[in-house]
Amino acid sequence: MKLIIENVSKVYKGGVWGLKDFSLDLELGVVGILGPNGAGKSTLMRILATITKPTKGRVIWDGKNIAKRQDDLRKILGYLPQDFNVYPNLNAVEFLEYIAAIKGLDKFSSAKRINELLQILNIFDNRKQPLGSFSGGMKQRVGIAQALLNDRKFLIVDEPTAGLDPEERVRFRSLISELPGERIIILSSHIVSDVEATAMDIALIKKGELVFKKTPEEMVDTMNGKVWEVIAQSDELPLLKENFIVSSTIRRKNEIVIRIVSDGKPSEKAKTVLPKLEDAYLYNISSANRELA
């Protein structure tokens, strides 16, 4: 089972590029599509979900061009779009039963799965309330449930933790990590920690182009000797931000601990520290900005 994205481009009205010559090969496991807002992640997800057609290029699933075999792909696809909507007058159970019927699931197995997902996603106690009364985070959990209703071989989740509180975000990460391995899962996000906790490979995307595909470990390893810590006074921070990538600041009583990503030593007071994935993300996005400008 393999997904091949081959030189896919998407051009919108006015000549705006959503994707540009994007190529990526994916096999079993979880891959994170990581990039800032507006990078082209949702455009790519919609193309893979057969909702949008590429301007050029093709997507091949298990040896078949999905543009010519859309129904075959949709049979094995679970999809949570970024702009997921619900029917406000239905409750969670009614909505999921409706989606299950559309997907051709039998009532017995779907009822069991619905109860299981409602409990996992912490909305079982609210299952009889109309969805119109749900918070944004609760609606997002219903969206996750509908994407996971049956045993899909190909699962796409686009910004799945938007609107979720920290506890719910951790629960979702665990849910994705614990799914059986005989499937391809694409997790699109701009939140580094979500991708780090679930993905075996990360595809970094910027301005519609693929920057690289690496494992999280490979990304972090490339940052050895490039992450620094500086203890400085408050009035030193603006100049450091102007000249370097500042990944975090921690304020103490009379000083600030500043984490800086830089090829060279940013200050005489700087000392190297162990890199994190977020450091690698900021460094590579900044580099891509310069290269794609």
Image (cartoon, rainbow, N blue to C red):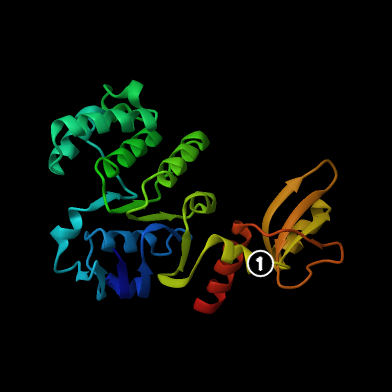
Q: Is residue 118 left or right of residue 190?
A: left
Residue 182 in sight: yes
Residue at (17, 53) in percent of width and height: 75
Front position in the image: 53 or 122: 122
176 displayed left or right of 219:
left
Q: Position of residue 80 (x, y in %)?
A: 31, 48
Q: Quadrant of residue 103?
A: top left
Q: Quadrant of residue 276?
A: bottom right
User: In the image, residue 30 lies at what x, y percent?
Assistant: 41, 56
Residue 275, horizontal then vertical, whole percent: 68, 60
CA neighbours of label 1 inside 10 A, class few (<14), some (14 to 19), many (20+)? many
Q: Residue at x 28, y 50 (%)?
A: 79
Helix, strand or loop at label 1? It is loop
In-front residue for pair 21/147: 147
Can you see residue 293? no
**285 sits to left or right of 227:** left
Viewed as shown, does residue 11 lie left or right of 166? left
Residue occupied by mark 1: 223
